[in-house]
Image (cartoon, rainbow, N blue to C red):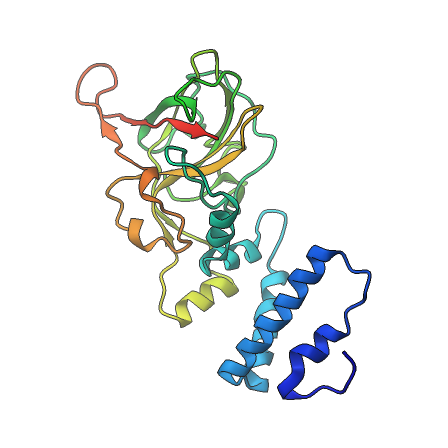
Amino acid sequence: MSGYFEESKSVEVVNGRMGTDVPERLATVMRALVAHLHAFVKDVELTEEEWGKAIEFLTSTGQICSGERQEFILLSDVLGVSMLVDAIQNRKPKGATPSTVFGPFHVEGAPERPMGFDISLDGKGERCLFEGRILDIDGTPIEGAVIDVWSDNAEGFYDVQQPDIQPKWNNRGVFKTGPDGRYWFYGIKPVSYPIPDDGPVGQMLGHIGRHPFRPAHTHFRVVAEGYKPLITHTFVAGDPYLEGDTVFGVKGDLIVDFVQEDEGERTGEWTARFDFVLV
């Protein structure tokens, strides 16, 4: 479409400038983006000052990003976009383990450990045994499933947030199942923690009256040949932030009863049992 820009036909004019050889999916996404963005601006009658503030916010969000920190992921998470994309792309049959947000603290290359290894390298926190099985939708154990696990430490920080304090790979590890599909390893009972709120996203949450906390959880990525990869968490039952998770990541089927042992050599320690069901 040719023509000069006018408020009444802003979407048509902007989308009319798109080339004819643009890949179909890219053209679809960009046309919709322009349409929704222009509709938003018209709906709230955005002022020049407000748009300037938005540009400042996005600029500062990019400037605080680094190899260890991804502020745009946090922004996507707290706006519920990460969970919405996840929900759309990971619709599953009944009985399959739900997925949830990947989060900004995963690190590739964690060492593979033998079953029964203790991934808490700093020795802090309440010791917990994580155990269960990796199954298919029919309940058959999956051999050779690779389980990548990571969590915060007893103070609520991931190792990459405290590289000079925590040992490298603290509360991280990779495990591979045998013929019985079973996994078991030691770590700590995770604790709730705030997402990094010293940057633009934290300031935004403060302005709109929201807290930055996530309920206690442990991250899992489970991959097996022939199955769709699973990215999920297990959450500690009874955590006060379950219904107010700042990134909207909690699903009822992922809440786990952490049981404190009251007899034997593991008295006082915790056990979290959970079976992961892949599609």
Residue 127 picture location, percent across and down: 32, 27
Asked if residue 129 is positioned above or below residue 64 in the image, the reply reads above
Where residue 8 appears, x then y in whole percent? 62, 87
Percent x, y for residue 255?
Answer: 31, 39
Visible residue check, residue 59: no
Front position in the image: 153 or 249: 249
- Residue at (57, 74) in percent of width and height: 54
Residue at image coords 42%, 65%: 205
The x, y position of residue 219, in whole percent, is: 44, 37
Image vertical order of residue 276 relative to residue 114, above or below: below
Q: Is residue 53 left or right of residue 264?
A: right
In the displayed structure image, the side of residue 85 where residue 189 appears, left or right: left
Name the quadrant containing residue 100: top left
Question: Can residue 12 be seen from the camera position used here?
Answer: yes
Name the residue: 40% across, 68% down: 206
Q: Relative to 258, is 181 above or below?
A: above
Give the image quarter of residue 24.
bottom right
Q: Which quadrant is the N terminus positioned in?
A: bottom right
Q: Nearer the viewer, residue 224 or 214?
A: 224
The quadrant where residue 10 appears: bottom right
